[in-house]
């Protein structure tokens, strides 16, 4: 969105900068350049969003040179501008002024009052973006035979423009709209545009997916682990009315104690297998019939374990000769929404290239679609998924491989083998060509270590282990060529 900034007249006095309502990042940057070039300190500038003031045009802007700011400050600005605090622009300009005046490392001093307050704003925006990524739900509708998806969301801050590219990447092939009280975003498969505010009443009626997903949520709800305080901490109640599964939560909580007592009184037995296939079957004609449709269901599904930012879907062409199956997304994969982009993924890409396997021609996915982790300070430490969690995602993996139809599937590590076989098989014993009986010879199999295993080895053992890993991939590539012939 284009904003406006103040003309800087000669002489002393207070000068007003007028920016567009919402998150006027372009307007703020233009104003900050002009003010700094004119040598105006923060105490001589008043900031206004959507009010009245003295405007300047493009000719004035041309006179202002770009600001040379430390990376920490440049990265902070777009993460604070969407905040609703009316003092955000004044605080940012105060930080910029002090940095340009010689305090180059100011952003690293967390105890400084300005830096501390801006840091809290940045964290609030990051939380708001996380909530929007996790809790926004689309509803499907049809108009004149054209399919469209619409969602309603009420963010705490002006984050729509910052959040929209995430949904473009996740749902690039769909036509969708996101409505908020502040504005709307629209994607037609090619162009992203923004419009006026929407209303919750503009949403279409619930679709088949909502009914199926609610039934699945109710069937997997564990009354013995009901913790309303923890649920509210992770998913505040303001988001409940926009999520189909939350309509069932009050009744599930009320019934939790009686159900728990009944579970204790029953004879011990193995728990019933969670069955996503039954829930998807309940969708009827809306059940996924393509990989894109399956991915849309997975992307809209809540994670089995709390905390994950998003489902990380498979990547690569349908019909790829070789599909690689790993364990689960890591920290970087969860943040970027792509498989194998963190340290282990970079090592895999390098080894594939040495083995003569083109990553872009292969299909890469994980047995588990969400990142399971433990927070230690500011770090998110990977936690290995258990057998129940692997089982929960197995149906998605089965359907995914059905749609991709590779000639060879390479299992990277023990969790991938468990997902593909349904039983624990030591990688050291199974390494090499392997038959995944569950798939009725629909594709050949190959087992090797996960690249993260190599990263954990002592330095003196890494070179030999990496060479063996590359040799495994060469054997897999040769097997793939043999199957193609």
Image: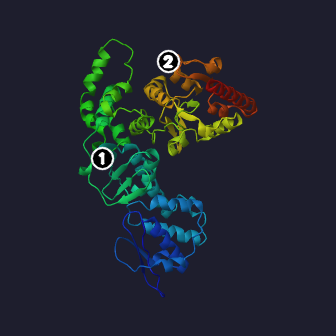
Instruction: State which quarter of the image contains the C terminus.
Output: top right
- Residue 287 drawn above or below residue 80: above
Q: Residues within 10 Å of mark 1 (few under 14, many from 20)?
A: few
Colour mapping: rainbow
Q: Is residue 221 visible?
A: no
Q: Where residue 238 is drawn, which disc sits there?
A: 1
**Direction from residue 344 to residue 197 in the image, left or right:** left
Q: Residues within 10 Å of mark 2 (few under 14, many from 20)?
A: few
Q: Where residue 38 is drawn, which disc sits there?
A: none
Q: Residue at x 45, y 44 (%)?
A: 170
Q: Looking at the rendering, which quadrant does residue 101 occupy?
A: bottom right
- Residue 169 drawn above or below residue 317: below
**Direction from residue 395 to residue 211 in the image, left or right:** left
**Direction from residue 414 to residue 185 in the image, left or right:** left
Q: Looking at the rendering, which quadrant does residue 89 occupy?
A: bottom left
- Residue 263 drawn above or below residue 209: above
Residue lying farthest to the front in this orientation: 485
Tell whether label 2 touches label 1 (CB within 8 Å).
no
Mark 2, residue position: 438
Q: Is residue 142 visible?
A: yes
Mark 1 or 2: in front is 2
Task: Please report whichever mark, 1 or 2, sits nearer to the chain's N-terminal start.
Answer: 1
**Residue 104 spot, x, y in % from top left:** 61, 66
């Amino acid at each position: 969105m284009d904003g406006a900034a103040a003309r800087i007249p000669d002489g002393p006095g207070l000068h007003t900068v007028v920016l567009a309502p919402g998150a006027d990042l372009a307007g703020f940057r233009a104003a900050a350049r002009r003010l700094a070039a004119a040598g105006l300190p923060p105490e001589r500038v008043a900031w206004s969003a959507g009010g009245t003031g003295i405007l300047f045009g493009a000719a004035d802007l041309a006179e202002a040179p770009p600001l040379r700011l430390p990376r920490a400050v440049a990265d902070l600005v777009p993460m604070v501008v969407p905040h609703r605090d009316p003092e955000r622009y004044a605080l940012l300009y105060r930080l910029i002024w002090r940095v340009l005046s010689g305090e180059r490392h100011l952003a690293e001093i967390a105890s400084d009052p300005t830096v501390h307050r801006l840091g809290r704003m940045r964290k609030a925006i990051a939380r708001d973006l996380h909530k929007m990524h996790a809790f926004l739900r689309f509803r499907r509708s049809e108009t004149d035979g054209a399919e469209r998806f619409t969602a309603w969301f009420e963010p705490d801050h002006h984050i729509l423009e910052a959040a929209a590219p995430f949904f473009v990447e996740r749902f690039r092939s769909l036509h969708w709209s996101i409505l908020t009280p502040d504005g709307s975003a629209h994607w037609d498969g090619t162009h992203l545009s923004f419009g006026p505010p929407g209303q919750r009443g503009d949403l279409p009626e619930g679709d088949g997916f909502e009914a199926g997903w609610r039934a699945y949520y109710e069937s997997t709800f564990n009354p013995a682990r009901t913790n309303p305080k923890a649920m509210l901490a992770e998913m505040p109640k303001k988001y409940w009315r926009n999520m189909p599964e939350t309509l069932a939560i009050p009744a599930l909580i009320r019934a939790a104690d009686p159900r728990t007592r009944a579970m204790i009184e029953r004879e011990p037995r193995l728990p019933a297998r969670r069955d996503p296939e039954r829930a998807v079957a309940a969708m009827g004609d809306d059940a996924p019939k393509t990989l894109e449709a399956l991915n849309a269901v997975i992307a809209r599904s809540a994670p089995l374990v709390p905390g994950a930012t998003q489902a990380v879907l498979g990547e690569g062409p349908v019909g790829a000769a070789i599909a690689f199956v790993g364990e689960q997304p890591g920290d970087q994969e969860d943040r970027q929404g792509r498989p194998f982009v963190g340290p282990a993924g970079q090592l895999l890409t390098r080894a594939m290239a040495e083995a003569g396997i083109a990553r872009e021609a292969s299909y890469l996915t994980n047995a588990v679609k969400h990142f399971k982790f433990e927070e230690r300070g500011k770090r998110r430490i990977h936690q290995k998924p258990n057998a129940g969690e692997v089982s929960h995602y197995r149906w998605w993996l089965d359907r995914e491989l059905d749609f991709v139809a590779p000639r060879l599937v390479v299992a990277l590590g023990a969790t991938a083998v468990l997902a593909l076989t349904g039983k624990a098989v030591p990688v050291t014993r199974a390494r090499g060509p392997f038959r995944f009986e569950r798939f009725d010879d629909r594709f050949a199999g190959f087992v090797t270590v996960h690249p993260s295993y190599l990263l954990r080895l002592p330095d003196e053992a890494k070179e030999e282990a990496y060479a063996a890993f590359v040799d495994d991939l060469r054997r897999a590539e040769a097997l793939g060529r043999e199957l193609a012939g």
